[in-house]
Image (tube, rainbow, N blue to C red):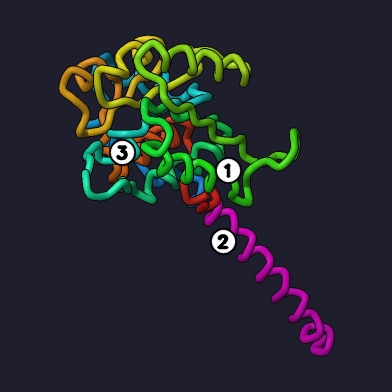
Amino acid sequence: HRGIFYDSIPAIAEDVLRRTLTNETVEEENKENKMIIPRDHFIDMVTGESSEAVWNKAGIIRAVISDVDGVFTDNTVDPLSPSKRRSYYDGQGVSLLRAIGVRVCLITSEKNEASRHIRDVVEKWNKLSSTSKAPGDGGWELVRLYEGSYGGGKVAKAEEWLKEVGLTFSDCAYMGDDLVDVEILRKVLLRAAPANADIAIRSIVDFVSQRSGGNGAFRDFANFILTAWGINPLTLPPQ
């Protein structure tokens, strides 16, 4: 009996270890699936109508369109340098949205050399390894950039793009910072602005980021949408 007992120890130990690891794995998965960014983090960023209505809107967003200067940059101009400051936090925010299937489009009034900085950035985003290489391959959809569009021109470009991807303004959010964005803000389901936006814009949107343009404003908005979807950003690829 003693031999049989000791011979069975490895099997028993293996079973105990398996069950222990399985329980630990389940606990880790449950922990991982919890939202790391709680709703309370955004309590001062949700404005306008009832906060629950805004959260509900964010939970069904399928596309995000954004202005560039004042959102992805700090909206300042250095006459001695053509370069513009931007934040890698915002680029990661774009990746997080793409990773969950939310399409992203940027529309700027700048063009030619003035928009070269964002043109180069979008080109870089569209060359990331996760980007779709062929229809149906499961990769991220391309980020679209429209240049030289003002006011009503932004609405026209947005309509063009949304029709192309099979969506409408009712599926869409927009982030902008000044009067040239008013017309398109009035069209979309969910309206957002960076902390540095003009007061006239902040007064008509549903969400005002904690961070300013060029310093993580778009990332705040992306994080907000992820929380509304119940998604932990730590479960998504860091590209």
Residue 216 picture location, percent across and down: 31, 44
Q: Is residue 43 visible?
A: no
Residue type at mark 3? Ala
Circle 3 crowding by C-alpha within 10 Å: few under 14, some 14–19, many from 20: many
The relative height of residue 116 versus residue 61 in the rendered view (above or below) is below
Specify which label sits upstream in the sequence, 3 or 1: 1
Residue 126: assigned label:
1
Residue 136 picture location, percent across and down: 75, 34
Secondary structure at badge 2 equals helix
Left or right side of 11 for 110? left
Assign the magenta stretch its main secondary structure.
helix
Residue at horizontal 37%, vertical 30%?
110
Give whichever of 94, 177 is nearer the camera: 177
Give whichever of 219, 75 is nearer the camera: 75
Left or right side of 203 for 131? right
Residue type at mark 1? Asn
Q: Which residues are magenta?
A: 1-30
Is 26 covered by the magenta stretch? yes
List the residue tagged with mark 3.
Answer: 217
Specify which label sits upstream in the sequence, 2 or 1: 2
Marks 2, 3: nearer the viewer = 3
Residue 22, image quadrant: bottom right
3D distance between C-alphas at marks 3 and 1: 21 Å
3D distance between C-alphas at marks 2 and 1: 38 Å
List the residue tagged with mark 2.
Answer: 24
Give whichever of 237, 139 is nearer the camera: 139
The relative height of residue 52 versus residue 116 in the rendered view (above or below) is above
Residue type at mark 2? Glu
